[in-house]
Amino acid sequence: MLESIQSLAAGFAAAATLQNLLYCLAGVIVGTLVGILPGLGPIAGIALLIPVTFGLNATSALIMLSGIYYGAMYGGSTTSILINVPGETASVMTCIDGYQMAQQGRAGPALAIAAIGSFVAGTFSIFGLVLIAPPLAQAALVFGPPEFASLMVFAFVVLSNVTGKSLVKALMMTVVGLILGTVGMDPVGGNERFTFGSPYLLSGIEFVAVAIGVFGLGEILVNAAKPPGQLEQRVLVPRLRDLYPSVTDLKRSVGAILRGTGIGFATGLIPGPAPVIATYASYAVEKRLSRHPEEFGKGAIEGVAGPESANNAATQSAFIPLFVIGIPFGPVPAILLGALLIHGVTPGPLLISESPDLFWAVVASMYIGNFILLLLNLPFVPLFANMLRVPKKVLLPLVMLFCMTGMYSVNNAVLDVWMMIAFGVLGYLLRGWAYEGAPLLLGLVLGPKLEVAFRQSLMISHGDFAIFVTRPVSIALLAATLLFLVYPLARHLVRICRSRPHAPPGASAPGSGDR
């Protein structure tokens, strides 16, 4: 414990340098704007900004990209409250009561409580990260290749189960991602695979092209296909003097903020879109515990405080599995994993011991970033709200230009731009066919890591597959994977059996009467 506090103090010293402070500031501002503008979100925002970080060192790059992530969680509440349009999916629950408060002339208190709840949740979650990450990293050191292979299979199945509406479609997209991950050089043998003689494909499918294409360009095409004026809604811009909540608002929000923080932090440690799950769970808990549940949906401030706190807490705690075991438990951490690998940083149990400067500086920057967001979000809400008035016919071409410029800057190759465009069209089609892009990206990022762990396991066992079922941790993870695959089918069969009409006792079967 004392060692962690000393390391965190050193991290604050590194994060407080002028360079890292500027990148932290840039990250949270961009993240807030990404969260505010409908149609983007943290996935597209981080994917678009990865090329900008190529000239930075790994610490500054991760500080900036992390700031975009939790900054987008702050910004998403602004559109939810002011125009009833969630800036990103984790802010859906905030629309329910936040917009009703705005309609009642209480947009200011709603925005203030959202900012305060996010700051408190982020603060507690960062200290939880400090306490949990080092001992968890020590425990993860006992994992060998079989355990990591089983864990990644578990992550694939669970994430596919909760990130899409259809498990079959999500698993199909995961398989497509795994196939794309095999293109390039064999990570174990060094042989060429599926390159078709093209030197461009020797390094594999460009991760940034897939991320920007599927999420960035795909979102642009989806928004461009919408009828004109659909996103140009009336914006309720609160005045600065109306931003402060009353003492009653604060008293009603304290319990919701603390409960949302606990729910969000715990949810971030399990596979799935943690911020989304956490907000739904928090809203349900607050409505159940409230003395006036009839107020929910009509402007209950607890309906804003709880989900927004859970949202930010889950965002911060999601960094624990990413840093400690090197496996992202959600779509955004998967993109951050790709960014880390691009900068030559391999997350996992050895990250804290081998790169303590990077780990503790990023953790400290999260606290600094949350404090900056608290200062920015209240005074600048009117300014951010006016960003919503930019016509999409002006905004979308600018984002498109930024996508192409950023993609070209990765390798200075026109082929990268064409690859991005191809995946952008694919992302647009996937949305039309109700397929999720996140499992595809997850398969592309984790596929090579799964392959290496799987083949190393077989090398250790001399080709004996029993190694995966004779080690306790590995078989436990595989059993959990099987449970997640079987449960939806079993639930469907039970529902069919219950829906069938049952004949009353003593009734004769059809056609069995006397003739």
Image: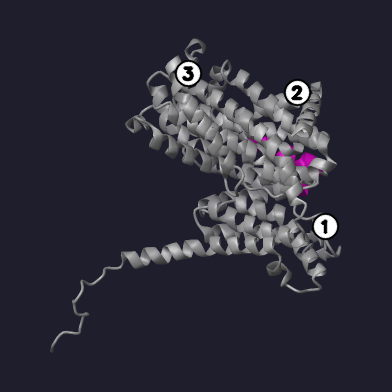
What is the count of numbered marks?
Answer: 3
Q: How is the image coloured?
A: one colour
Q: Which amino acid does label 3 sit on?
A: Gly
Residue 291 falls left or right of residue 205: left
* Comes first in the chain, label 3 or label 1: 3
Viewer can see residue 262 = yes
Dot 2 and dot 1 residues touching (CB under 8 Å): no
* Comes first in the chain, label 3 or label 2: 2
Which is more toward the observer, 89 or 416?
A: 89
Residue 121 location (% of width, % of height) = 58, 30
Residue 115 location (% of width, % of height) = 55, 24
Residue 352 falls left or right of residue 244: right
**Residue designated by label 2:** 22
Asked if residue 405 is among those painted magenta in the image, a careful observer would answer yes
Could you tell me which quadrant the N terminus lies in? top right
Mark 3 or 1: in front is 3
Give the quadrant of residue 42. top right
* Mark pair 2, 1: CA separation: 36 Å
Asked if residue 94 is among those painted magenta in the image, a careful observer would answer no
* Mark pair 3, 1: CA separation: 54 Å
* Mark pair 3, 2: CA separation: 28 Å
Residue 392 location (% of width, % of height) = 55, 32
Mark 2 or 1: in front is 2
Q: Is mark 3 on a helix, strand or loop?
A: helix
The residue positioned farthest toward the front in the image shown: 2
- Residue 202: assigned label: 1
Magenta stretch: give its range. 399-416
Q: Residue at x 35, y 30 (%)?
A: 291
**Residue designated by label 3:** 108
Look at the picture and state if 57 lies above or below 342. Answer: above
* Comes first in the chain, label 2 or label 1: 2
Q: Which residue is drawn at 72% across and 57% down?
A: 148
